[in-house]
Image (cartoon, rainbow, N blue to C red):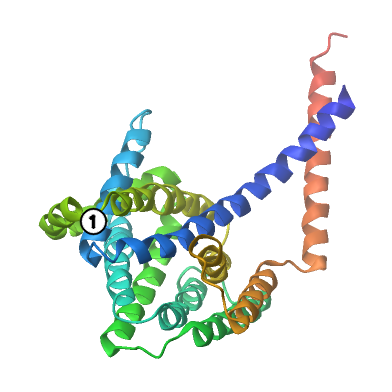
Amino acid sequence: MTSASSLAGRSRPRLQSALPIIAAMVTVLFWASAFVAIRHVGTEISAGALTLGRLAVASLLLGALLFTRAPRWPSRRDWPALLICGVLWFGLYNVALNEAEQRIDAGTAAMVIGIGPLLIALLAGLLLGEGFPRPLVIGSTVAFAGVLVIGAATSTGSTEGIGVLLCVVAAVAWAFAIVAQKPLLSRLPALEVTWLACTIGLVCCLPFGPALVRETADASPPTVFWLVYLGVFPTAVAFTTWAYALTHTSAGKLGVTTYLVPPLTIAMGWLLLGETPALLAIAGGALCLFGVYLARRVSRRAASSKSAGSQAASSQAASSQAASTRAAEPS
């Protein structure tokens, strides 16, 4: 009985430590699929209307889930960060990136937007006190190099200055929004933060309402389906799993996992659209994977120290519980 309880006690922390990693992988998988879906939806629906449509679907779904229980409302001090997150990430980032992808090729967009995780690591190190761990710096650099290789392999040379500028705007907006979101998650649940920020972004995009109504009325059923998909999975689900993962890890380390999005997008394009990737793009994807591995790995010394500390804490807790049990027994 004691052995079974001890085994369960040891497996529970392992599962809890794995959940943020699983949440991050769910996020990057759905965000990668979003690029494939946007490629289709963008042929019939404009950038602003596309953003408003997916945010409307996501806000309705998250709101329905949220109000099945008593939500925890933000305090007055939380609203500035929520506004930054909602306006910059859910609003400006999505509109700018969607518009940019209609002006420049996917390879150039991947290269420019790839500065986002580097900016997140820089701002988190400066403003959130996360510092600049050596594995994170090296891994981020290697992963960014992989994105550059992918961009070089997939770029068609069709580039507009305004498209590049929009990608830069999207990357900067994303980085500042993540730095604003991180402290919020220490005070509010991930679902509340995601729904509120999503709804703020929705309100900002309301001027695109007439275009959304007009364009969805003329769109084909598959386009409408993919628009709803973008709202449910890459927005409602993926932004919530991102917030959950960010609650349990540093912004810089989580940001670098998004370098998995370009190789996953290439793989999905190959499987779903029959787009055979160039060998150079595959090499770039492998470099991204290696960079993320380097950024997220923990040195053996740190891991063994953490493990020893956890075991000591568990032993101390077990001893205290045993002592309490003996004291409670009748003499």
Q: Residue 99: x percent and y percent?
A: 27, 73
Q: Residue furthest front?
A: 274
Q: Position of residue 37 (x, y in %)?
A: 39, 60
- Pick the front one: 213 or 172: 213
Q: Residue at x 47, y 72 (%)?
A: 120
- Label 1: which secondary element: helix
Percent position of residue 114, x then y: 47, 78
Whether residue 267 is situated above or below residue 29 in the rendered picture: below
Measured from the top left, where is residue 21 in percent x and y?
62, 54
Q: Which amino acid lies under the numbered mark 1 shown in the image of this protein?
A: Leu
40 sits to left or right of 151: left
Compared across the picture, whether 326 is left or right of 255 comes to right
User: For residue 138, which quarter of the picture?
Assistant: bottom right
Question: What residue do we see at 56% from left, 76% from top?
Answer: 277
Compared to residue 80, the image places residue 292 above or below, namely below
Closer to us: 258 or 227: 227
What residue sits 69% from the left and 73% below the top?
Answer: 294
**As drawn, is 113 to the left or to the right of 280?**
left
Q: Quadrant of the N terminus?
A: top right
Write down the residue under mark 1.
52
**Residue 144 sits in quarter:** bottom right
- Say above or below: 95 vs 151: above
Q: Within 10 Å of the Cα at label 1, are there few (<14), some (14-19), or many (20+) other Cα atoms?
A: many
What residue is rendered at 85% in x and 27% in y?
4
